[in-house]
Every structure is written in C-alpha cells, then in structure tokens.
Amino acid sequence: MDITTMRILATLVSFACFLGIWWWAFARRNKARFDEAAQLPFDQD
C-alpha cells in the first residue's frame, strides 16, 4: 500500500464522517433538543 492509497482512504473516511455528522445534525428527532439548547443563553435565572 503506497502513500497515495492511504491518502485516498483517509479522504474517504473523513468524508464518511462528515456525512454522518451532517445526517445526525439535521435528523428530525434531534430538532427539539437542539432548539432547547439554542435557547439556553437567553434563559433568566
């Protein structure tokens, strides 16, 4: 396995991780939790 093949594999793994994070961030089941977290700085004690 040469360096070019390793670079290609690293790029593909990185892209797969990116797609996984993107899918997790935009999943509908997380919307309520993210909306609640977005309002935390505005909550008054």
Image (tube, grey):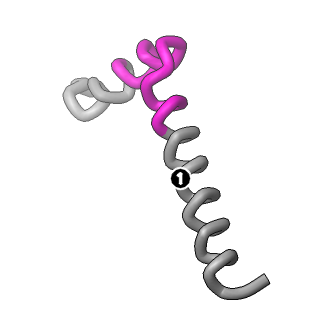
Q: Position of residue 9 (x, y in %)?
A: 66, 66
What secondary structure characterizes most of the magenta part?
helix
| Residue at the spot 51% in from the left edge and 30% down from the top edge | 23
| Residue at the spot 53% in from the left edge and 30% down from the top edge | 24
Q: Position of residue 11 (x, y in %)?
A: 56, 64
Residue 30 falls inside the magenta stretch: yes
Which residue is label 1 attached to? Answer: 15
Q: Secondary structure at mark 1?
A: helix
Q: Which quadrant of the structure image shows residue 36?
A: top left
Read off the magenta span.
22-35
Quick one: which residue is furthest to the right in this view? 1
Nearer to us in this view, 11 or 4 = 4
Nearer to us in this view, 32 or 39 = 32
Q: Is residue 35 left or right of residue 4?
A: left
Vertical order, 3 against 30 (above or below) = below
Q: As shown in the figure, which amino acid type bears the numbered disc 1?
A: Phe
Image quadrant containing the N terminus:
bottom right
Nearer to us in this view, 40 or 10 = 10
